[in-house]
Amino acid sequence: MTRPQPRDLVPRPDPAPGQRWLRRRLADRVDFRDALLASLAEVTEPGGGPLGERLDVAGDPTVVLVAELWARVADSVAAYTELTAGERYLGTAQDWTDLRRTTDLLGHRPSQRVAAHGWIRCTTDTGASPLVPAGTRVQAPGTPTRPAQAFEVVRDTQLRADWAALTVTAVPQPTSPPGASLRLLNDPRWRPSDRLLLVAEKPSAFVPEPTDWWDWLAWFYLYYYGVAATRSVVGTVSVTKRADDLGAFLFTMDRPLSGLLAPAAGTTYAAYRVRANLQLARRLEKLSFVSGTTASTADVTYSGEVAAIQASQLLVVDASAATPGLGIVVWNGSGALVTTVASVGSLDWSVAPGTKHRVGVVTLTDALPLALQSSDIDVALVDDRVLAQHYELPPLVHGATRLRVHPRPQLVPERIAVLTSTTWELASCSLDGSDTPTDVGGMLLALTSGFTGDAVAAPATSNLVAIQHGTTKSAPLAVAAGSAIVPGPVTGDVDAAGTVTDSLVVRVAGVRFDEVPTLYGRGSSEPVYSTKIAADGTLVLAFGDGEHGALPRGDITAQWRVGGGLAGEVDGPLIDTLLGSVRGVRKIAGVGATTGAADQEDQLRMRRAAAARIRALDRAVSLGDLADLALTVPGTSHSAAWRGAGPPGCPCGGLGLHLAFLRTTETGARAPLAAELHSMAGYLDARRDTTVGLCVCAGVASALPVTATIATDPRREPAAVVAAVTAALTDPTGPLAAAPRELGVPLDDSDVVAVVQPVTGVVGVVSLAVTPGIRTPSAGQAGIGRTPAERYELLSVGAVSVVAT
């Protein structure tokens, strides 16, 4: 007869930190049964010894059956006790609703689904400027692997005809003209057959105040000759062809310009369209005669008459083309004077002794330098000066933050989408500081960030419309015991302060009620309500009772949006269907990926966000506060803050205070996009001292390939063991997946072995190789099997190759 040994059932010690399950069970079924049998064997009968000395307690089937039944009851009670205790702790609660109740005590509201936001570009009818109403629906059609995703226009958006069909180049670059072509940004109104006078211009040299004779002589010379020397006529050309070139004006001349407009330091070139050439009035100056056998000459004098060339006046054969204010150029080999006509007159002027003709008198606004007061000058009436600067329209290279759009729109757009060498790309823009309204064919824009692709005379548009994931629903609500249920999943949005707000709008008898965190402390007439979110995304509304918050009286209607979540993050080109029609809009297409979405918080994110919120208290003082605050932003999966060098290419480009974060995806984590970086920076700036610089940058998610060779139990099928090991290593909820790991934490070989070794059928790990991430392990790290991580890097297991021996 075997007598069972008594057992002491004592509570297990308090669980260690970091455990996923609370182990508080007093004993299991077998322990309870054996302890009960041992206790029965020790029972003393009246007037006799222990029961176990007379009865085979452990061998009696009836006794064992009864003990087994009671052990099962005790095991169930112990299991439920352990489960109930575990559901009261933030780190060990497994049920979503139980965990929400715990986080409520910490003042944390689990974030609901957040809608993805994006942009679509609209192709409009020629000349149309339609209005796209808020709520207009567009769709990314479904595929065999992805259901259709519906989006709505966020706000009424006015499209403009002059924002459609734009063409983009880089900022025009001045250069020397190639061949006989001259491209100008402003329209000089030249036409074929026009003659142009090309003038080289140099700045006047600075002449110091003279102090001695030689300085006075130099000053005197420059005074009379220097003005003319600052300009010189380099030639005349004729226009043979005019063409519009992306808002610029391309002229072809009758001769090459490269030699005439050759680059020279400090020299610019001007072009003047010639109205008419003026011929100087000439007279008989000498007489030739033969005296006997000798040829002789004699000067002819005209007493009392002015000369044809004077300091501020020219006598010309015909001055009918000249008018006051018209430009005039006087030049010879010494230089040129560009001025205007001050007045025009006429007089009878002797052209030979006893013979007078009517000549024109042209008075100049500026005096002729001495070098031009000679008979070898040429004179031309010209239009206004045009800078003869040739411009090239180069392609827009990736990363450039300035561009030119053609044709020039009347209003400056806030955003522009450009078809680059990669895809349609979107950027915010503003008027560039160097833009001039005289560039009637184009507008210079400054971008907040450059594109990733190049653009060669690329099509562009600013007819862009903001969209958000989900669809709007409206329905009456039934209130029971002061509560109402809104079927979900109800989509939320993130406001400018970074707070998640649901899309619910509630009206009672036509009066809008506002959502508040709690009804406690609210007045008896305040039209408010509070909400709690359920595990399936349903919202439970609690209305006031007339003491705390107004009692709802009348019909209750609600409007909300359903959808949202990571399913709404799609590539822009997939959004290509307009549901319904908008007058004047022919078709739509997405631009860039939709971003900013987040699924409803699961248990892991709820634990992290609740703990982070209570640590940070909605303000950033320390590095840890920054990282914690980032975790409270919906969709943030990981964050890290540090002082020191940032990632390569980070916005600050150097040392300082940095915060890196990653976004949640359906399969792990990804780097945030530009809009998400900007949103995170704004969220943190609202909660910290902005006099201290902070660089918000993207983290890096590195999924490391792992190769392992394992020894298997010869009694088991190797292929099945290999499949089980592969599944354990790639388990999306396992310890080597991206979600439970942290930024900057290394991945050790022991971490991998700890997952592989417990798999049934694994005898041992023969060899293991982990491909490094950004950092190459040092000799010491390689010696201990450690794969290091940068502070902004998340290491997880990616592709797995397992071989059995």
Image: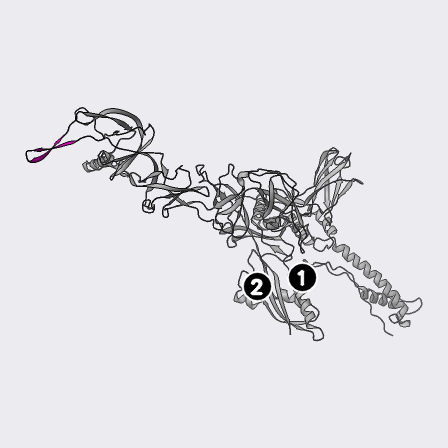
Horizontal and vertical percent position of residue 453? 51, 52
Is 59 above or below relative to 245? below
For the C terminus, give its image quadrant. bottom right
Report the front residue among 239 and 423.
239
Q: Are marks 1 and 2 in contact (CB under 8 Å)?
A: no
Helix, strand, or loop for circle 1? loop
Horizontally, residue 753 falls left or right of residue 657, namely right
For residue 520, say whether it is visible: no
Which residue corresponds to mark 2?
A: 787
Report the front residue among 351 and 539.
351
Horizontal and vertical percent position of residue 454? 49, 51
Q: Which residues are magenta?
A: 280-300
Is 731 above or below relative to 254? below
Horizontal and vertical percent position of residue 581? 64, 41
Horizontally, residue 221 falls left or right of residue 29, namely left
* Residue positioned 88% across, 72% down in the render: 59
| Residue 87 part of the magenta segment | no
Horizontally, residue 753 falls left or right of residue 554, namely left
Helix, strand, or loop for circle 2? strand
For the N terminus, give its image quadrant. bottom right
Colouring scheme applied when the structure was drawn? one colour
Which residue corresponds to mark 1?
A: 731
Of labels 1 and 2, earlier in sequence is 1
For residue 22, say whether it is visible: yes
Is 606 above or below relative to 67? above
The residue carrying pointer 1 sits among few (fewer than 14), some (14 to 19) or many (20 or more) residues within 10 Å by Cα, namely: few
Q: Quadrant of residue 151?
A: top right
Report the front residue among 778 and 491.
491
Amino acid carrying label 1: it is Asp
The residue carrying pointer 2 sits among few (fewer than 14), some (14 to 19) or many (20 or more) residues within 10 Å by Cα, namely: many
Report the front residue among 363 and 1.
363
Q: Which mark is residue 38?
A: none
